[in-house]
Image: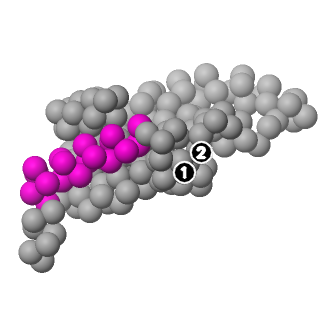
Amino acid sequence: MSYTLKKLNSTPIINIILYSLAFLASQRFSLGPIHSIICVVTYLISLCYFNNKREKFNTLLILSIFFSVGNGGSIYTETPSFIRYIIYLTAICAIFYKARFSIQRITLFSIFLTIPTLLMVAHKDLLILEVLKRDIIILIAAFGSLTLHQKSLRKFRLNFTLLHNCILAFMA
């Protein structure tokens, strides 16, 4: 690892960068469209930790989701949806990474989904694609959280101190 990456990887420097990004992400009215891209920077930093420090990788993914702007309400700029969906899918894949599933829970989950699926097929005219994309992401997340073994869920660790401090910087 080069000297620059080692220096950047030190905890105080990366924490200062993340706190600064959190503060900038909260400046929706004063920074214009720049604040909506802060989640990309956090996401790219998280990818640097994928192989080495999974706890920091997971924490930075959660922060990327937190920093993304999903509903600007035509008041401030939203994060482009393809960027948000990339971050969402990466976070879901991080949860499923080396996971074990319970067959009994998968069966129960499938039984509960049959009625909404049948209703959706019966009323195709009520299908809205924008809502469907969001619902698929929610469905994947629900599938993972409801069907994973408890041991697999314990492997998904977060650095709560870093998460807490970045959220405080966001709210400052």
User: Is disc 1 placed on a helix, strand or loop?
Assistant: helix
Identify the residue at image location x=61%, y=49%.
81
- Most extreme residue toward the bottom is 2
- Residue 108 location in percent, x, y? 53, 24
- Circle 2: is it few (<14), some (14-19), or many (20+) Cα within 10 Å? many
- Most extreme residue toward the right is 125
- Circle 1: is it few (<14), some (14-19), or many (20+) Cα within 10 Å? some
Q: Which residue is mark 2?
A: 77
Disc ID at residue 80? none
- Residue 53 location in percent, x, y? 18, 53
- Horizontal side of 91 relative to 4 (left or right) equals right
Residue interval drawn in magenta: 9-26
Q: From the viewer's side, name the closer residue of 153 and 169.
A: 169
Q: Which residue is mark 1?
A: 33
| Principal secondary structure, stretch drawn in magenta | helix
Where, by quadrant of the figure, is residue 27 drawn? Answer: top left
| Quadrant including the C terminus | top left
What separation in Å lies between label 1 and label 2 (alpha carbons)? 5 Å
- Horizontal side of 10 relative to 45 (left or right) equals left
User: Is disc 2 placed on a helix, strand or loop?
Assistant: loop
Q: Are marks 1 and 2 in contact (CB under 8 Å)?
A: yes
Which amino acid is tagged 1?
A: Pro
Identify the residue at image location x=42%, y=31%.
145
| Quadrant including the N terminus | bottom left
